Image: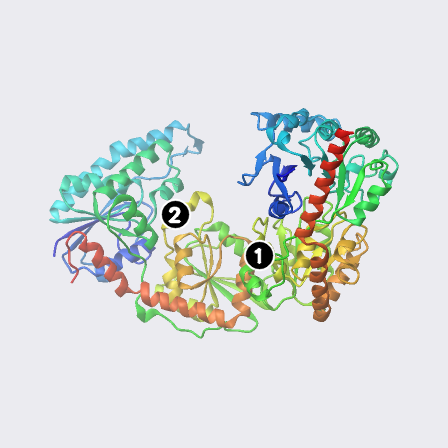
């Protein structure tokens, strides 16, 4: 084949998560001989390589109603009938390989997957453990996903259920995956270990492909100008974090309590938060608070990482940790909880610092230790950048995906010949 | 010199901002060159200027311009205020025009200068100029759209009033605007030459205090004049509350000048209300007893036009006091742009607590910046807000109708 391999990336949206849905590495994929297009349910950008999936009038309203019905019946990603029409989309037919990303957040019926994957060689990135559970995105501290779920202790976790149908959902997924011809991408050893222990992933082809970042953009730089642009007072140790208050996995409450537990010896910090605003008011008496809100401009994110002395990511569940990697690439050490992908991804304990999940006192202790030890921060920051260069280069990431796409296409064509 | 008749809703006086500025302008004119026809709200109690005692003023009552929503405690049907406003427009305004016309003829006026504040004045301007056959100069303090919204005028009458404003501006040979931005806007929109005429002070009142916070244990925030930006003021109070009334170790106190009690829940020990003070005394208090001077300007979308076109009269007073300004308001507002261009304020572009906190912290922690803001404000005052500069602009305004101010 002389032309580039054509890959269609299917996901719920384009801009949010562009770092791991293939959009931000389109150039690197092209350099690796892959022509990449995107079909998304919720198109927000203007990129011509992105098209709105299933652009039929009224369909999104119908989908929302169906979603309400699914929630009322304690089902998820089951009845979105439009998913079967994806195969009729011209871009689907154009593709040599289809790569599925966020397809489990409500707009897509997983039942369409066997048919779609039969039509085209397929790759599916599991961005979180939901494909391995009976309902939750992250089975925090729960092992029931290893044995079929049922009697779920946390039905309130996303995607929440009114009645316990976790065993039924689990069995339904097992049926769907049985004989599924798909290459599954997992970004961390943590996810690989889960998949290897999951009854649902048995028989699937699993590949570890860590995500990558643009190491030229996300790079160490002087903190002074970045701090001035963001309004950070120059003489404070600055701790950055993503504050996702509405997401119970992201540990916003843990971070806030950890800050409030800090003693006077730490002095007045600057707490630099992104995403949700207005949650740090209670810390303003002691610390400067800079609420950047939702950031779409990568340059502002780079400023935030460069302005920060420490990046705090107290997620209770994480399948990779893209923001941690971005911070590391900018030379900022990361503090996280253990029992998720972050200790491995951030190189804890030598480079990052990980404390027991949910232990807010330990989290405060780690912040305090790093805040009061500039030499340790500098050492960890240098090591973090080196680790990012060694393991999280988006050029390498794109190259690995390109290999995977070619292998998937070749396997299918060999199968067809046979 | 040609004889001018000023048609205004607030006469030259000492106790209203518009009246203060009008008095400053009137003083620029030689005796006998000006007469005033004042269509005055019944509730106003202007204190006239002694030095303008010889100025001929005829005062008539203005009917209320607020929406008639209740009558003896009963809520009126929606159609009633529309009818009342139409009645005012058709029945009340024409006699006022006739009275103003008679007075202008009596005073042998050769130029008509009209303050376009409120629907009554706007409705009178163009018809009166036409009946008299006189060149019209217009003067705008605030955008009419803001006034009409504040007075809850219904949509139909609002449309008619805005058209009357357009007619007056198009009939006008020159316009005195409330800001540089407003002057540019009206020139672009109506093709009328416009010049900003803003509150000004005698340069002798200007103070040059030391460019630093006075005490090491206290930060005193001054506020003078009206509280027309409630959300922004509340943003300051919320920030101070969240910071437990301490900025970088300094106890914060508020010192308020003006006729209004400041809104919000302020601990009594943090607040000192000094009431209304004469201008010279106000400048002294702000200069000698305050470290930072607060100016809020509305960020809400329904106040966008007024924010972009008006200018806070308190700013010249603040600049004259020589202390740094803390501005909480939109970056694209008229004062926001002016302050950014002149580097004359610590700015928070929204009533957002972290933004206000950052500005307060820097004011206290960055002495060089504090001093530079104070100096920039003093420079802005000297360049743009002295009586001499105001007189220059007033002379340009009069020159639009061929009147030379000697």
Residue A165, placed above or below residue A223: above
Q: Position of residue A42 (x, y in %)?
A: 60, 35
Q: Residue sitting at 86 percent across and 34 percent down?
A: A148
Which residue is label 2 attached to? B306
Report the number of numbered marks.
Answer: 2
Residue B13 shows in the view: no
Mark 2 and 1 residues: CB-CB less than 8 Å, in contact? no
Q: Position of residue A264 (x, y in %)?
A: 71, 67
Do the residues at pointers 2 and 1 share their chain? yes
Q: Residue sitting at 26 percent across and 65 percent down?
A: B388
Which residue is label 1 attached to? B354
Q: Position of residue A414 (x, y in %)?
A: 76, 33
Q: Quadrant of residue B198?
A: bottom left
Give the Cα separation between the discs numbered 2 and 1: 26 Å
Residue A115 shows in the view: yes
- Helix, strand or loop status at disc 2: helix
Q: Is residue B215 left or right of residue B40?
A: right
Q: Quadrant of the N terminus of chain B?
A: bottom left
- Front-lying residue, B405 or B96: B405
Q: Residue sitting at 75 percent across and 57 percent down?
A: A346
Q: Quadrant of the C terminus of chain B?
A: bottom left
Give the number of the disc on residue A205: none
- Front-lying residue, A412 or A369: A412
């Amino acid at each position: 084949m002389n032309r580039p391999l054509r890959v269609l990336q299917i996901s719920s949206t384009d801009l949010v998560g562009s770092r791991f849905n293939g959009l931000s590495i389109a150039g690197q994929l092209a350099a690796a001989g892959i022509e990449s297009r995107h079909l998304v349910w919720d198109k927000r950008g203007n990129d011509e390589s992105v098209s709105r999936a299933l652009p039929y009038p009224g369909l999104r309203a119908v989908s929302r109603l169906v979603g309400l019905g699914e929630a009322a019946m304690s089902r998820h990603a089951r009845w979105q009938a439009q998913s079967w029409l994806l195969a009729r989309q011209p871009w689907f037919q154009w593709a040599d390989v289809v790569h599925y990303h966020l397809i489990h957040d409500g707009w897509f019926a997983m039942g369409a997957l066997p048919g779609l994957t039969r039509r085209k060689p397929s790759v599916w990135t599991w961005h979180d453990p939901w494909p391995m559970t009976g309902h939750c995105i992250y089975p925090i501290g729960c092992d029931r996903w290893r044995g079929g779920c049922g009697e779920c202790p946390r039905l309130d976790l996303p995607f929440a259920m009114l009645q316990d149908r976790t065993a039924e959902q689990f069995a339904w997924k097992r049926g769907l995956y049985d004989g599924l011809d798909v290459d599954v991408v997992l970004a961390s050893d943590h996810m690989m270990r889960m998949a290897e222990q999951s009854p649902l992933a048995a028989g699937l082809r699993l590949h570890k492909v860590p995500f990558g970042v643009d190491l030229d953009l996300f790079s160490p730089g002087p903190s002074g100008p970045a701090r001035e642009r963001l309004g950070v007072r120059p003489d404070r140790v600055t701790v950055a974090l993503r504050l996702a208050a509405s997401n119970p996995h992201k540990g916003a409450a843990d971070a806030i309590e950890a800050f409030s537990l800090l003693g006077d010896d730490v002095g007045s910090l600057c707490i630099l938060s992104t995403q949700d605003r207005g949650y740090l008011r209670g810390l303003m008496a002691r610390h400067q608070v800079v609420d950047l809100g939702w950031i779409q401009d990568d340059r502002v994110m780079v400023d935030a990482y460069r302005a920060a002395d420490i990046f705090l990511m107290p997620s209770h569940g994480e399948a990779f940790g893209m923001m941690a990697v971005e911070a590391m690439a900018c030379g900022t050490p990361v503090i996280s909880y253990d029992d998720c992908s972050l200790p491995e991804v951030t190189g804890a304990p030598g480079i990052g610092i990980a404390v027991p999940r949910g232990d807010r006192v330990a989290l405060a202790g780690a912040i305090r230790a790093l805040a009061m030890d500039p030499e340790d921060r500098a050492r960890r920051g240098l090591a973090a950048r080196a680790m990012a260069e060694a393991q999280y280069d988006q050029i390498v990431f794109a190259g690995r995906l390109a290999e995977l796409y070619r292998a998937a296409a070749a396997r299918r064509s060999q199968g067809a010949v046979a | 010199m040609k004889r001018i008749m000023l048609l205004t809703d607030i006469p030259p006086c000492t106790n209203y901002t518009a009246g203060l500025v009008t008095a400053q302008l009137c003083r620029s004119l030689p005796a006998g060159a000006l007469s005033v026809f004042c269509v005055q709200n019944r509730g106003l109690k202007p204190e006239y200027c002694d030095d303008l005692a010889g100025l001929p003023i005829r005062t008539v009552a203005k009917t209320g311009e607020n929406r008639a929503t209740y009558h003896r405690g009963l809520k009126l049907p929606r159609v009633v205020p529309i009818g009342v406003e139409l009645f005012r427009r058709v029945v009340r305004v024409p006699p006022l025009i006739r009275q103003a016309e008679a007075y202008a003829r009596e005073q042998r006026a050769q130029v008509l200068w009209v303050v376009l504040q409120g629907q009554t004045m706007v409705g009178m301007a163009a018809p009166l100029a036409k009946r008299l056959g006189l060149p019209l100069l217009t003067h705008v303090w605030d955008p009419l759209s803001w006034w009409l919204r504040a007075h809850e005028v219904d949509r139909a009458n609002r449309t008619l009033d805005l058209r009357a404003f357009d007619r007056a501006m198009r009939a006008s040979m020159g316009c005195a605007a409330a800001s540089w931005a407003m002057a540019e806007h009206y020139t672009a929109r109506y093709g009328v030459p416009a010049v900003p005429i803003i509150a000004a002070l005698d340069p002798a009142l200007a103070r040059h205090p030391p460019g630093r916070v006075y005490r090491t244990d206290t930060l005193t925030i001054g506020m003078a004049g009206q509280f027309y930006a409630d959300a922004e003021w509340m943003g300051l109070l919320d920030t101070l509350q969240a910071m437990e009334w301490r900025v970088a170790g300094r106890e914060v106190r508020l010192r308020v000048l003006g006729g209004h009690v400041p809104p919000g829940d302020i601990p009594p020990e943090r607040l000192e209300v000094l009431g209304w003070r004469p201008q010279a005394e106000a400048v002294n208090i702000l200069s000698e007893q305050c470290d930072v001077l607060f100016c809020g300007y509305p960020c809400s979308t329904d106040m966008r036009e007024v924010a972009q076109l008006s200018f806070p009269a308190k700013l010249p007073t603040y600049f004259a006091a020589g202390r740094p300004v803390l501005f909480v308001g939109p970056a694209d507002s008229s004062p926001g742009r002016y302050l950014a261009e002149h580097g004359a304020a610590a700015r928070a572009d929204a009533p957002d607590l972290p933004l206000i906190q950052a500005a307060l912290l820097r004011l206290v922690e960055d002495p060089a910046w504090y001093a530079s803001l104070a100096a920039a404000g003093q420079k802005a005052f000297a360049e743009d807000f002295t009586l001499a500069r105001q007189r220059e602009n007033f002379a340009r305004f009069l020159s639009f109708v061929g009147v030379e101010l000697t």
